[in-house]
Image (tube, helix red, strand yellow):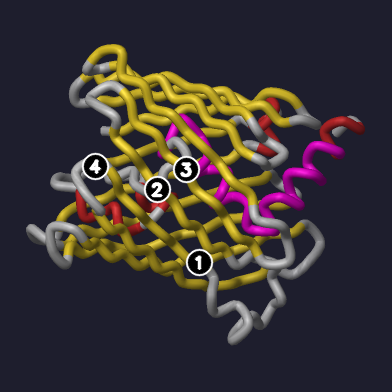
Amino acid sequence: MNKFLWSAFALLRAFYCCGQDAALIAHSAATCNYSLNSNDVWSASCNPAGLTEVKKLSCGLFYNSNFLIKDISSQYLIAAFPLNKKISSAISLFRFGNEFYSKNQISIGGGMRLNDNIRLGAQLHFQYIYQSEQSPLYYAFPELGISYRINNKLNASSAIRNFTSNLYNEHKINEAQLLRIGLSYVFDEKIKIHAQIIFQNKNYPFVGVGIDYFPKEKICIGFNISSTNQPFNIGVGYKLKPVEIKIAFAYHQFLGISPASAIVL
C-alpha cells in the first residue's frame, strides 16, 4: 500500500473504531438521508422503531467505496419482514476493512407499533473485529429507538446505542455511545426536511440536516449537510418496481469524494 492508502486507512479505521459507522451510514443519501424516520428497511441503520412500517419482506444492499479505495470500503446487507400487523423484524450484516483489519457486525432487531402515534424499536449488535497479527475481538451492544408522530407533518424520534458499554466491555473496544435526536417535517408530497443532533461520548455533538425532494413520484433527490468531517452528501434515487436504486456522493474535507450506492428489493 502506498502512503496515501495507509493514511486514508488509518483515518477511516479511527472513525469506525469510534462508532462513526452508524452515523456515517445514516448520513448517506443512498440510505436514510439524515433521517431518524426512514420508515423502511434502512431503519435498522437509523432507528429500529421505523421497522414497524415494513409491511412486506424487503432486502437492502449498501456499498460505500470510501475515496474509491477498495481496501477501505464498507458493505451493508439487510432483510426486514413483518411478523404481524404491529411488529416487524430485521437482520443485517455489516463489514468494513480489508485483509489486515476488518470490522464485521451482525444485528438482530425489530420494531413495534404501540398506537397510531408511538413506535418502539430495539436491536442487538454482535461485532467481530479482525486485526492482523493480533487476537480477534468480540463485542455485543444494544440499541433502543422511539418515534412519536406529533401531527400529520411533524415526527420526532430518538435512538440510543451502546448505552451498556460501561457495564460490560471485556475487550475494551472503543465503540462509541451514541444518542441521536431528530425531527422530520413534511412540507408536501415533494419536499421533506430532516434534522438531527448526535451526542457521542468524549466528543462534541454534531448536527445534520437533510432535504428530500421528489420532482416526480419515482424520483428522489437528497442533499445533506453536517458538522462532521464529511459535511456534504448528495444523491438521487429511482423507483423501478420492484427495485429502488440510490446513488450518492459524499465529500470529506481531508480525503475527497466517496461514492455510495444502495439497492432495495
Q: Main secondary structure of the magenta part?
A: helix
Q: Earlier in the sequence, mark 2 or mark 1?
A: 1
Q: Position of residue 87 (x, y in %)?
A: 17, 62
Helix, strand or loop status at disc 3: strand
Residue 154, above or below 205: above
Helix, strand or loop status at disc 1: strand
Q: Which residue is the extreme one toward the top?
A: 216
Q: Look at the numbered discs 1 and 4 and tell me whether their residues touch, using CB distance below 8 Å.
A: no
Residue under the image location 63 percent in, 82 percent down = 166
Mark 1 surroundings: few (<14), some (14-19) or many (≥20) residues within 10 A: many
Which residue is label 4 attached to? 58
Of 25 and 155, the residue lying toward us: 155
Q: Which residues are magenta?
A: 7-32
Q: Amino acid at mark 2?
A: Leu
Q: Position of residue 219 (x, y in %)?
A: 30, 16
Residue under the image location 60 percent in, 67 percent down = 177
Q: Amino acid at mark 3?
A: Ala
Q: Amino acid at mark 4?
A: Ser
3D distance between C-alphas at marks 1 and 4: 24 Å
The numbered dot on residue 183 is 2
The numbered dot on residue 195 is 3
Q: Is residue 10 magenta?
A: yes
Q: Which residue is the extreme one toward the right?
A: 3
Q: Position of residue 21 (x, y in %)?
A: 59, 50
Q: Which label sits in the foreground, 2 or 4?
A: 2
Residue under the image location 69 percent in, 58 percent down = 18
Of 220 and 31, the residue lying toward us: 220
Q: Look at the numbered discs 2 and 1 and tell me whether their residues touch, using CB distance below 8 Å.
A: no
3D distance between C-alphas at marks 2 and 4: 25 Å
Mark 2 surroundings: few (<14), some (14-19) or many (≥20) residues within 10 A: many
